[in-house]
Image (spheres, rainbow, N blue to C red):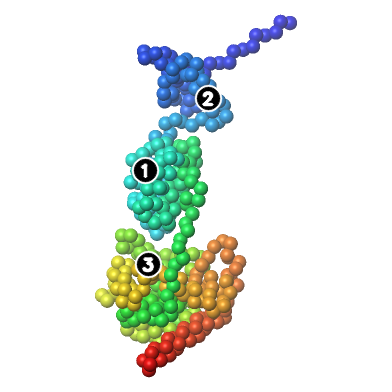
Amino acid sequence: MAGRKPQRRREFGTVRKLASGRWQARYLGPDGERHTAPETFETRSDAQDWLNLIRADIERNHWRDPDAGAVNFEKYALRWMQERGLAPTTLDRYDGLLRLHILPTFGGKDLDEITPPSVRTWRAERLKATGATTVAKSYRLLKAILQTAVDDDLLRSNPCRIKGAGKEEADERPTATIEQVFDLADAMGPRWRLMVLLGAFASLRPEELAELRRHSVDIDECSLRVTQASPELTNGKRVTGDPKTRAGKRTVYLPDFMLPELRRHLQWFAEKEPDGLLFVGEKGAPFRRSTFGRKWRKARTKVGMPKNFRFYDLRHTGNTLAADTGAKLKDLMVRAGQSSERAQLIYQHSTAKHQRRLAQGIDAEVRAQLREAAATQQSVHEA
């Protein structure tokens, strides 16, 4: 029996010669829409080769709508943030990074106009204009947004491909001496003295201090119960909620020398109701970061501390002091309210007894250093 003639493969797409003499390629895509090649070709063969590449992509399920990436980056990024269900503080931080560092360069571009070279150029320019930590955070945000665009089939690949660009390598933060902590507390004045001491000797975060209330204080145990935090957003509004980490809800035992400080503050400055705030401004309103910041900068200058010493560095100071007592890692993490999935088993067995012992160690160290400082001053006066 005579063999059948092999069937010719059905032609894919069409090519036609334009008045210019060049060739145009068109095809019907899987989406049912007719697509035209983004450029014309010198020969019919070149146009057909392009169609063959498109056909191969379709057969391998690699085809992507060539117009899919024609979406404005700014609109996509803003929708990305709204759809993430982000915490108010995270949304506030991302908004700042986007507005100040990303949109000025990419806001007017479509997604498919953002290329690896343009990302490299943007990052290099940002590093000249701002700190490396901010650039790393901005890069991570840009990469996350564009990765979602890849997942949405709007981009074939993510143009953020710089190895290590999202890694933060923050400088070691400065610490204060015990004497400097007390000097700062004195310089801040009676109303804010306790806040400085708690920032250092209780290792509390600023947003945790802002939400401490009268009922948070246990005078008999010389301790504080941290249950909520109230970070301040860029617009000045405070958002009250759970602490930064799951381990943030904790009891912090204080060194014994803090007891008179607690009593004095409760008597003179804290709101009188059981749920009254521990720290309020001179006019009775919750303290504002801007107002407190001005006082802090003046106190820092008066004491002679470096300009890069932030209020948050008191927490670092306290953590360092606690570590110097020889406490175990799990006890240090509980006191500081630090948490991670990997560290969960490390700190979960830290007991109140361990925490009291840690506080006693801090108390002994502070008293010893204060005695040493006083003796040094006395010898100077007598000389």
Q: Which label sits on residue 215?
A: none
Q: CA distance from mark 2 to mark 3?
A: 58 Å
Q: Nearer the viewer, mark 2 or mark 3?
A: 3
Q: Position of residue 376 (x, y in %)?
A: 42, 88
Q: Is residue 273 above or below residue 74?
A: below
Q: Is residue 231 above or below residue 53?
A: below
Q: Is residue 143 above or below residue 379?
A: above
Residue 301 visible in rendering = yes
Sequence-wise first label, 1 or 2: 2
Residue 225 visible in rendering = no
Q: Which residue is mark 1?
A: 106
Q: Which residue is mark 2?
A: 53
Sequence-wise first label, 2 or 3: 2
Q: Nearer the viewer, residue 215 or 8?
A: 8
The residue located at (56%, 61%) in the rendering is 341
Q: Position of residue 301 (x, y in %)?
A: 31, 73
Q: Residue furthest top?
A: 2
Q: Nearer the viewer, residue 29 or 23?
A: 23
Q: CA distance from mark 1 to mark 3?
A: 32 Å
Q: Secondary structure at mark 2?
A: helix
Q: Amino acid at mark 2?
A: Leu
Q: Are marks 1 and 3 in contact (CB under 8 Å)?
A: no
Q: Amino acid at mark 3?
A: Asn
Q: Nearer the viewer, residue 230 or 126?
A: 126
The residue located at (42%, 31%) in the rendering is 67
Q: Which residue is mark 3?
A: 308
Q: Position of residue 336 (x, y in %)?
A: 49, 71
Q: Residue furthest front?
A: 383
Q: Secondary structure at mark 1?
A: helix
Image quadrant holding the N terminus, namely top right
Along the horizontal axis of the image, is 190 left or right of 176? left
